[in-house]
Amino acid sequence: MSNHPEVIVALDYPDPEPAWDLVAKLPERTWFKVGLELFTRAGPSVVERLVGEGRHVFLDLKLHDIPNTVAGAVRAAGRLGVRLLTVHGSGGEAMLRAAAESAAVSNSGSAGDLRLLAITVLTSLDDAALASVMGPRARVEETAGRLAGLARESGIDGAVCSVSEARAVKVACGSEFLVVTPGIRLAGESADDQKRVATPAVALAAGADFLVVGRTITRSDDPAGVLATIRLAVAPEA
């Protein structure tokens, strides 16, 4: 990791054409997130094209299935040249270990650098919403910390959590454990459908390694300028 967070631009589009329009406007070596909607529409070809153009890809598929199936999906992602891939922390220890072992084999057999991230609690959930699913005692911060700890013990490289839980996860799991924070907004922006959002500066202070930024950039008339502004906000001299 560099000594400041990397910014990942979320290509949350229903079709590939606007995604490619945005990619063309942003600098080389930019990180991009490919999520469920775009991957379902465009398939592996969207990842192959990004990797072929020298872009770093965060494939956010939130894998959650039996261990053997998830291990196979991890192998497939490794062959695509993906750098970051998500699995659900709630999938359990056996699933997480199978994913980690599959990634290790994938990396040892090629020049790959695939790292796995455990999804903790989605940023669209708050304590009340989580409790409605997991029971009245469930709390976001405690659940995120517990799932991140399980992921680390199972060989997973990092976790996805909101900025609100990032510092606690870093303290509990160690500085080498990656923390990826979605829900990044500039000051004054709408939270849209996310409950736990934060500015780039707050994410930097919380120890995040990657900031996932979507609509702040994708809806802008000057996406390259907004990306540069965010990068400046988290630069060491900022």
Image (tube, rainbow, N blue to C red):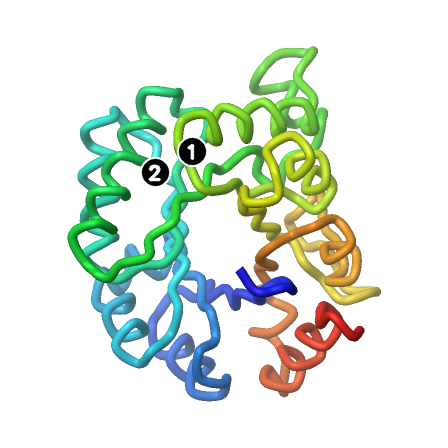
The picture places residue 193, in percent across and down from the top left corner, at 64, 49
Which amino acid, mark 2? Leu
Name which quarter of the figure residue 72 lies in: top left
Residue placed most toward the observer, 111 or 116: 111
Judged from the image, the secondary structure of the residue bearing numbered disc 1 is: strand
Mark 2, Cα crowd under 10 Å, few <14 / some 14-19 / many 20+, is many
Q: Is residue 90 above or below residue 100?
A: above
Q: Residue at point 27% right, 29% down?
A: 98
Name which quarter of the figure residue 21 lies in: bottom left
Q: Is residue 144 above or below residue 162?
A: above
Judged from the image, the secondary structure of the residue bearing numbered disc 2 is: strand
Q: Residue at point 67% right, 80% down?
A: 226
Q: Residue at point 18% right, 58% down?
A: 110
38 relative position to 125: left or right: left
Residue placed most toward the observer, 42 or 23: 23
47 relative position to 177: left or right: left
Q: Is residue 78 above or below residue 221?
A: above
Mark 1, Cα crowd under 10 Å, few <14 / some 14-19 / many 20+, is many
For disc 2, the marked residue is: 63
Q: Residue at point 26% right, 34% down?
A: 101
The picture places residue 18, in percent across and down from the top left corner, at 41, 78
Marks 2 and 1: in contact by CB < 8 Å?
A: yes
The picture places residue 78, in percent across and down from the top left corner, at 24, 53
For disc 1, the marked residue is: 88
Which amino acid, mark 1? His
